[in-house]
Amino acid sequence: MDPMNKHRVQSINDLSRFYDVLATDYDMMTNFEKRFAQEKPFFKLLIDRYNIAKALDAGCGTGYNSMILAQLGVDVTAADISDEMLRRTEKHARTLGVQVRISKSSFQDLTSHIDEKFDAIFCLGNSLVHLINQIDLEITLKNFSSLLRSEGILFIQILNYEKILNERNIIQNVKEEGGVTIIREYEYEEKTIRFTIRTIRHDGKVKLENANTVEIRPLIRTDIIPGLYSAGFKDIKIFGSISMIDFVPTNTKDLVILAKKV
């Protein structure tokens, strides 16, 4: 293990500010409303298969996954480090008429803010890659384990960085809607990636541009799986999307991990 990577720390305040800034455009960027019909059946399958009555949405963003779970009858706690993201989560819950508990917390401090057991923890939306050193990753996985009941499940989704690191594309995604263009860019460093979201607003003849940057760690299977076993997980399964298709390192967009607590 690289000792620099083991101890390197990213400020929680910096990460919180990054997502506070991003919150305004986050729903548009992630196709909030359009994904419900497509993804809800896969959540329903997990809920039925693993008897999920109570779940934690860790790194909830604006609450998309929390809303689906709540609509499907799950008792949901939504946690995030961004005040603005949590405010939007609460607004979505009011709009959709569902109940969601809110907790402001980093992954590393979850057990200090939440004192209950869950049937499932969902950590989706590429959230885990913000843990840029191995110690924080290990602490987080142990926290997830501590918050799960026996036989509870952990469902992780990040991007497939085996594919991304092989291709090394700078432009990852471009989204245009309602006079706003959002460009997601990667700058590859030795052990981490500088992730920039460039927002361009077209107001008649005026073009306003803003760049928001944060550091991420391009996690792959071998970075995560040993920590899951050490944290007390078993029956670890790998998929290529939340639809649980086969994972193909050179092809699939996502890396999805499903693990059961011992």
Image: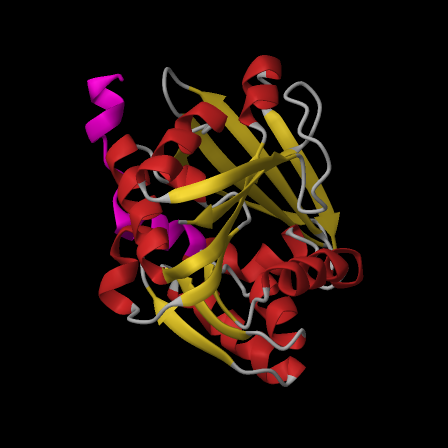
Examine the rendered structure and indicate whether residue 91 appears above or below residue 8: below
Query: Going 79% across and 56% down the picture, which residue do you hit?
Result: 38
Front position in the image: 177 or 3: 3
Is 11 included in the stretch rendered in magenta?
yes
Question: Which image quarter: residue 204?
Answer: bottom right
Residue 191 in view here: yes
Q: Would you say the magenta stretch is mainly helix, strand or loop? A: helix
Examine the rendered structure and indicate whether residue 124 appears above or below residue 82: above
Front position in the image: 21 or 139: 139
Query: Going 63% across and 64% down the picture, which residue do you hit?
Result: 47
Is 60 included in the stretch rendered in magenta?
no
- In the rendered image, residue 95, in percent from the top left (x then y), is placed at 64, 82
Residue at the outermost right position:
37
- In the rendered image, residue 222, in percent from the top left (x then y), is placed at 44, 24
How is the model colour-coded? secondary structure
Front position in the image: 82 or 198: 82
Query: Going 46% across and 73% down the picture, which residue do you hit?
Result: 87
- In the rendered image, residue 176, in percent from the top left (x then y), is placed at 73, 47
Q: Is residue 139 left or right of residue 163?
A: left
Q: Is residue 60 left or right of residue 104?
A: right
Question: Which image quarter: residue 59?
Answer: bottom left
What span is colored magenta in the figure?
1-19
Query: Going 72% across and 55% down the picture, which residue do you hit?
Result: 42
- In the rendered image, residue 246, in percent from the top left (x then y), is placed at 71, 32
Examine the rendered structure and indicate whether residue 51 appears above or below residue 71: above
